[in-house]
Amino acid sequence: MVCRNPHSHPDPRATRTPKAIEELFNSLLDTLGWKLADATPRKIILDAAFMTGLRKILGWHGLQDPSLSDLHPSLGNFDHTARLINKLRLEQFPDGTGFQGILAMIEENASLPHEQVYVRCAEKHDIPGERSFSLIICMFKRMSELLLHTKRPSIDTSFKRIHRWQEFEIEAWFPEYSRSVVVARAFTTSQSAAAHHVLFKRIFEIVEADTGQQVQFRHIHGTGWDTIIADEHRGQALGLGLYLQEICCNMAGYCSVDWTIALHELKPYDHTKRCLRICFQHYSTRVRGLKPHVLTAVYGAMMALYSADPIPNYDATISLIQHGGKKALGSVIY
């Protein structure tokens, strides 16, 4: 049907991107490099290199940045733009950007000099009584050297960057650089103690392979890691204790903190009591915010959970908190 009379509405927006414009758009996406792996229409317009290229192509001189629709109206449809991004991403990452893509990256990196290899392992582990979990460890050789020589590292787990994965970091302060440096980064799908046991073991194996030296702990070896700061994420403390118990099981000698106890007799929590320190600020800030909403006894029970020692009446303490109201119950679930 052809309408000849004047229309009261503007022309419909273009829905298809011409080939020449698509090639220009792809050339801009190429400037993202590895960032293309998780690029989205919203992310690319925040990328400085991408926007610089877009300004150059458009001859844009205004203070306000151009939008994708200034390149072509069809790119104003973010669903359509996302399809173009996914098309190029599949070409550059044929194995995907998930776990299989990481395995392919490890194979490709095998030809690189050892100092340039960042992704060190991508593994799946089966733990009896638990679901299998995936583990990815990222460390340059230089990071291994820094980790070996630190004295008071901190460990932290984040949940923000990758859906269904937790990002684990070991960080330490280095006076010579006047800054904190991440000396190990890992991604895992489990927070259990058994999973953290595997995590610590693999990280320290990588350090030993890179440096030829074993990571040492002061209460075991008399030198090395003195204090480890953690933020109470599930499984971290016990996982570390299990690893330390494993390396001491056939070791002669006595604990350098308490010379009356043989190293092979130390249990996991005995180890953590000697080297692990929970960040009280993390815990107390969260609990203090609940103080106006719970009974005094419940608040006391919540604060009692802050301990490096096993809690004798743990079940009773948890029960008291669980029956202390919705907010108290939420703290237990957390």
Image (cartoon, rainbow, N blue to C red):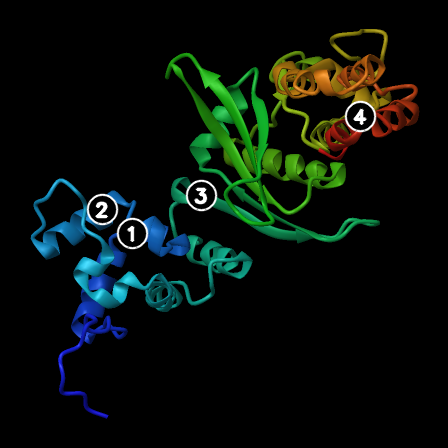
Q: CA distance from mark 1 to mark 4?
A: 46 Å
Q: From the viewer's perspective, is residue 121 above or below residue 150?
A: below
**Which mark is in front, 1 or 4?**
1
- Return the residue at label 1: 32
Under mark 4, the amino acid is Pro
Tell me where residue 261 appears, x and y as whole percent.
85, 12
Which of the marked residues, 4 or 3, is nearer the chain's N terminus?
3
- Return the residue at label 4: 268
Tell me where residue 44 appears, x and y as whole percent.
31, 51
Say which quadrant the N terminus sits in: bottom left
Residue at 78%, 24% in the rendered image: 251
Residue at 44%, 25% in the rendered image: 181
- Return the residue at label 3: 118
Front residue of this view, candidates 331 and 241: 331
Dot 4: few (<14), some (14–19), or many (≥20) neighbours within 10 Å?
Answer: some
Q: CA distance from mark 3 to mark 2?
A: 24 Å
Which of the marked residues, 3 or 1, is nearer the chain's N terminus?
1
- Mark 4 secondary-structure assignment: helix
Determine whether, in the image, residue 104 is placed left or right of residue 218: left
Disc sitting over residue 49 in the figure? 2
Residue 252 appears anywhere in the view: no
Under mark 3, the amino acid is Tyr
Picture quadrant where residue 72 is located: bottom left
Tell me where residue 145 appears, x and y as whole percent.
48, 27
- Mark 1 secondary-structure assignment: loop
Q: CA distance from mark 3 to mark 1?
A: 19 Å
Q: Are marks 3 and 1 in contact (CB under 8 Å)?
A: no
